[in-house]
Image (cartoon, helix red, strand yellow):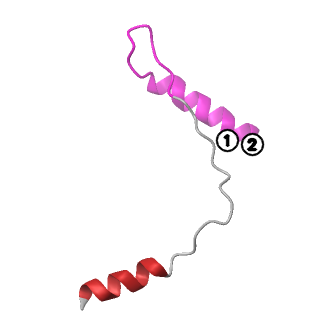
Amino acid sequence: MFMADEEEKTSEIPESKEDKSEVIEFEFNEDGEEDLKKTLKKLNRKMIDG
């Protein structure tokens, strides 16, 4: 009974007609590790600039 309710809920979620998402690549430091601070700054600029 619970599973049937869950299936109904998931089928009611509307799908996006248009994908407006953009992929933001991670920035890396000289050690080859992800530089989260630089990546977040890059993402923030993208959000502000629209």
The part of the image, by quadrant, that contains residue 35 is top left
Local crowd at mark 2 within 10 Å, few (<14), some, or many (≥20)? few
Name the element at disc 2: loop
The part of the image, by quadrant, that contains residue 31 is top left
Q: Are marks 2 and 1 in contact (CB under 8 Å)?
A: yes
Give how far across and how far down residue 1 sits, in percent. Answer: 24, 92
- Amino acid type, callout 1: Met
Relative to 49, 39 lies left or right: left
Q: Residue at x 67, y 41 (%)?
A: 47
Give how far across and how far down residue 37 sits, in percent. Answer: 48, 25
Instruction: Find out whether residue 41 is within the magenta segment.
Output: yes
Name the image quarter holding the C terminus. top right
Residue found farthest to the right: 49
> What residue is pinned by disc 1?
47
> What residue is pinned by disc 2?
50
Quick one: 30 or 23, which is closer to the camera? 23
Quick one: 49 or 19, which is closer to the camera? 19
The segment highlighted magenta reads 26-50
Placement of 47 over or under 32, stated as above or below: below
Q: CA distance from mark 2 to mark 1?
A: 5 Å
Q: Residue at x 54, y 30 (%)?
A: 25
Quick one: 8 or 38, which is closer to the camera? 8
Give how far across and how far down residue 7 sits, in percent. Answer: 36, 82
- Amino acid type, callout 2: Gly
Instruction: Find out whether residue 18 is within the magenta segment.
Output: no
Q: Residue at x 71, y 39 (%)?
A: 48
The part of the image, by quadrant, that contains residue 30 is top left
Give how far across and how far down residue 42 sits, in percent. Answer: 60, 29
Relative to 40, 5 lies left or right: left
Q: Residue at x 63, y 42 (%)?
A: 22
Placement of 29 over or under 10, stated as above or below: above
Placement of 44 over or under 3, stated as above or below: above
